[in-house]
Amino acid sequence: MKPPPKAIAVIVDVIESQGAIHITDDDGSYIDMVGTEFAGHLVLVPWDKSWFLRASGSIEVGYVIV
Protein backbone atom coordinates (compact mmCIF):
# COMPACT_ATOMS: atom_id res chain seq x y z
CA MET A 1 0.00 0.00 0.00
CA LYS A 2 1.21 3.47 -0.79
CA PRO A 3 0.32 6.26 1.70
CA PRO A 4 -1.18 9.49 0.34
CA PRO A 5 1.29 11.48 -1.81
CA LYS A 6 1.54 14.33 0.70
CA ALA A 7 2.25 12.07 3.70
CA ILE A 8 5.39 13.05 5.60
CA ALA A 9 4.96 10.46 8.36
CA VAL A 10 3.06 7.29 9.18
CA ILE A 11 1.61 6.76 12.65
CA VAL A 12 1.27 3.16 13.81
CA ASP A 13 -1.00 2.36 16.78
CA VAL A 14 0.56 -0.52 18.68
CA ILE A 15 -1.18 0.54 21.92
CA GLU A 16 -4.42 -1.34 21.33
CA SER A 17 -3.67 -3.16 18.08
CA GLN A 18 -1.81 -6.37 17.39
CA GLY A 19 0.01 -6.69 14.12
CA ALA A 20 2.83 -5.11 12.19
CA ILE A 21 3.67 -2.94 9.22
CA HIS A 22 6.53 -3.86 6.93
CA ILE A 23 8.21 -1.01 5.06
CA THR A 24 9.84 -1.66 1.68
CA ASP A 25 11.22 0.49 -1.11
CA ASP A 26 10.11 0.60 -4.75
CA ASP A 27 11.88 -2.65 -5.65
CA GLY A 28 10.55 -4.53 -2.59
CA SER A 29 13.75 -4.36 -0.54
CA TYR A 30 13.23 -4.37 3.24
CA ILE A 31 13.56 -0.97 4.96
CA ASP A 32 12.09 -1.49 8.44
CA MET A 33 9.20 -2.90 10.46
CA VAL A 34 6.97 -1.72 13.30
CA GLY A 35 5.40 -4.52 15.30
CA THR A 36 5.06 -6.12 18.72
CA GLU A 37 8.44 -4.80 19.91
CA PHE A 38 6.63 -1.44 20.19
CA ALA A 39 3.59 -2.84 22.06
CA GLY A 40 1.92 -0.18 24.20
CA HIS A 41 3.13 2.74 22.05
CA LEU A 42 2.18 4.99 19.16
CA VAL A 43 5.04 4.95 16.68
CA LEU A 44 5.77 7.85 14.32
CA VAL A 45 7.73 6.85 11.20
CA PRO A 46 9.15 9.68 9.05
CA TRP A 47 8.06 8.77 5.53
CA ASP A 48 9.84 8.71 2.17
CA LYS A 49 7.60 8.94 -0.91
CA SER A 50 9.37 6.00 -2.56
CA TRP A 51 8.41 3.58 0.25
CA PHE A 52 5.50 1.15 0.48
CA LEU A 53 3.92 -0.47 3.52
CA ARG A 54 2.24 -3.79 4.08
CA ALA A 55 0.12 -4.40 7.16
CA SER A 56 -0.36 -7.77 8.79
CA GLY A 57 -2.66 -8.67 11.66
CA SER A 58 -5.04 -6.08 13.04
CA ILE A 59 -3.21 -2.76 13.19
CA GLU A 60 -4.30 0.85 12.77
CA VAL A 61 -2.23 3.23 10.66
CA GLY A 62 -2.66 6.98 10.24
CA TYR A 63 -0.82 9.62 8.23
CA VAL A 64 0.63 13.08 8.81
CA ILE A 65 -0.25 15.08 5.69
CA VAL A 66 1.13 18.48 4.65
Image (cartoon, rainbow, N blue to C red):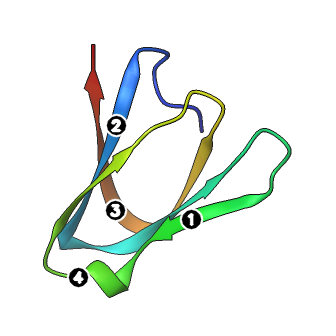
Q: Is residue 56 left or right of residue 45?
A: right
Q: Position of residue 35 (x, y in %)?
A: 40, 76
Q: Is residue 38 above or below residue 56?
A: below
**First in residue order: circle 1 vs circle 4:** 1
**Comparing labels 2 and 3, the label whose residue is closer to the camera:** 2
**Comparing labels 3 and 4, the label whose residue is closer to the camera:** 4
- Residue identifier under label 4: 39
Amino acid type, residue under disc 3 in the picture: Ile
Q: Secondary structure at mark 1?
A: strand
Q: Is residue 9 above or below residue 24?
A: above
- Residue identifier under label 1: 32
Label 3 packing within 10 angstroms: few (<14), some (14-19), many (20+):
some
Q: Position of residue 65 (x, y in %)?
A: 28, 20
**Comparing labels 1 and 4, the label whose residue is closer to the camera:** 1
- The part of the image, by quadrant, that contains residue 32 is bottom right
Find the distance from the CA under tag 1 to the CA under tag 4. Answer: 16 Å
Nearer to the camera, 22 or 49: 49
Q: Secondary structure at mark 3?
A: strand
Q: Position of residue 18 (x, y in %)?
A: 31, 77
Q: Secondary structure at mark 2?
A: strand
Contact (CB < 8 A) between labels 2 and 3? no
Find the distance from the CA under tag 1 to the CA under tag 2. Answer: 14 Å
Amino acid type, residue under disc 1 in the picture: Asp
Amino acid type, residue under disc 2 in the picture: Ala
**First in residue order: circle 4 vs circle 2:** 2
Q: Quadrant of the N terminus?
A: top right
Q: Quadrant of the C terminus?
A: top left
Q: Position of residue 30 (x, y in %)?
A: 71, 63
- The part of the image, by quadrant, that contains residue 38 is bottom left
Q: Is residue 42 above or below residue 41?
A: above
- Residue identifier under label 3: 59
**First in residue order: circle 1 vs circle 3:** 1
